[in-house]
Amino acid sequence: MALNDATRTVMDAPAPGSALLTQPDLLRVGGAGLHSRLFLGTARYPSPSVLADAAQAAQVEVLTVSLRRLAPQSQSGQAWWQRIQSLGGHLLPNTAGCHSADEAITLAHMAREIFATPWIKLEVIGDDYTLQPDPWGTVAAAQTLVREGFAVFAYTTDDLVTAMKLRDAGVAAIMPWAAPIGTGAGPRNLPALRTLRERLPDSVLVVDAGIGAPHHAAQVMELGYDAVLVNTAVAEAGDPVAMARAFTLSVQAGRLAHRALPMRTREVAQASTPMVGVPFWHQGS
């Protein structure tokens, strides 16, 4: 998605002196190569035009859509569906609202037919209060959908064992939450997210749910996560378009910081300006 010149910042321009600033850094997932590592949800925006402006400002290439909410095959959903199509990029339909593996599998088949894509964001909810995913239902649905040719983006918690089973099932991406969906609380368990990244070095990991502010996105990207999905944090911001742009910049910053290898933390202070010998103003006195 093209970005208007008026929204460009000096941060977009590469600086000399580092190969990291000019090397391609594509995210390869589900058979696609993506330049943007921010995925954007399409619900809760004040209007379709605000959504379109936010998607353009953020330069996103992946938009998530809910078959249950969008209903493009119905009369009422046609206008919204046409606006979503006009945004371009890759559509990632989801199975939001499903409470069993069978329900999610059925909805995934409907989504593949309607949206003409093998991509599916798999959600099997186990608890209506926290909207915590059902690990058994999610893994079972993932195994079936992968066998049937879907590129599965599986929503899960930060539980390592569940993530490992999803990896073994062959999903395209594992999508652990940072916090319960819609809370905006940010990463509640950074050590668990760090463990997932360390133990699943070859898996595509996308943080999904609970991200509330751009610095949350930067945090998880610094851990080495491959992408971040946000919806409510942008849609319910005072200025969704500006917030979408802020998230893109934070994702880029976090990704670059991870690749640049942050300094190691220390238990004791260490002067940033070493003192060697006699201060210059004492020399010659």
Image (cartoon, rainbow, N blue to C red):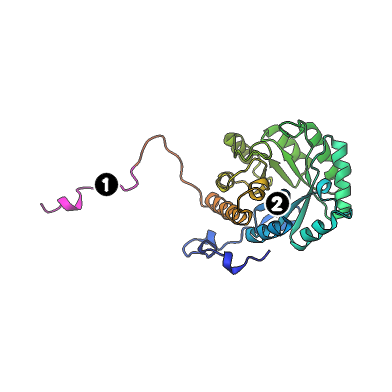
Q: Position of residue 62 (x, y in %)?
A: 72, 55
Amino acid found under the numbered disc labelled 1: Met
Residue 181 image-quadrant placement: top right
Question: Sequence-wise, which precedes: disc 2 or disc 1?
Answer: 2
- Quadrant (top left/top right/bottom left/bottom right) for the N terminus: bottom right
Q: Position of residue 250 (x, y in %)?
A: 56, 52
Give the alpha-carbon distance from disc 2 to disc 1, as whole Å.
Answer: 55 Å
Secondary structure of residue under mark 1: loop
Q: In screen coordinates, is 186 left or right of 70?
A: left
Is there CB contact under 8 Å for labels 2 and 1?
no
Amino acid found under the numbered disc labelled 2: Tyr
Q: Is residue 166 magenta?
A: no
Of badges 2 and 1, the one in the foreground is: 2
Q: Position of residue 257 (x, y in %)?
A: 52, 51
Q: Which residues are magenta?
A: 271-285
* Residue 85 visible in the current orientation: yes
Task: Look at the magenta stretch and give its main secondary structure.
Answer: loop
Secondary structure of residue under mark 2: loop
Q: Is residue 282 magenta?
A: yes
Q: Tell me the residue at 30%/47% (across/down).
A: 274
Q: Tell me the residue at 20%/49% (across/down).
A: 279
Q: Nearer the viewer, residue 248 or 157?
A: 248
Q: In screen coordinates, is 255 left or right of 127?
A: left
Image label count = 2
Residue marked by disc 2: 45
Q: In screen coordinates, is 270 left or right of 161?
A: left
Q: Nearer the viewer, residue 222 or 44?
A: 44
Residue marked by disc 1: 275
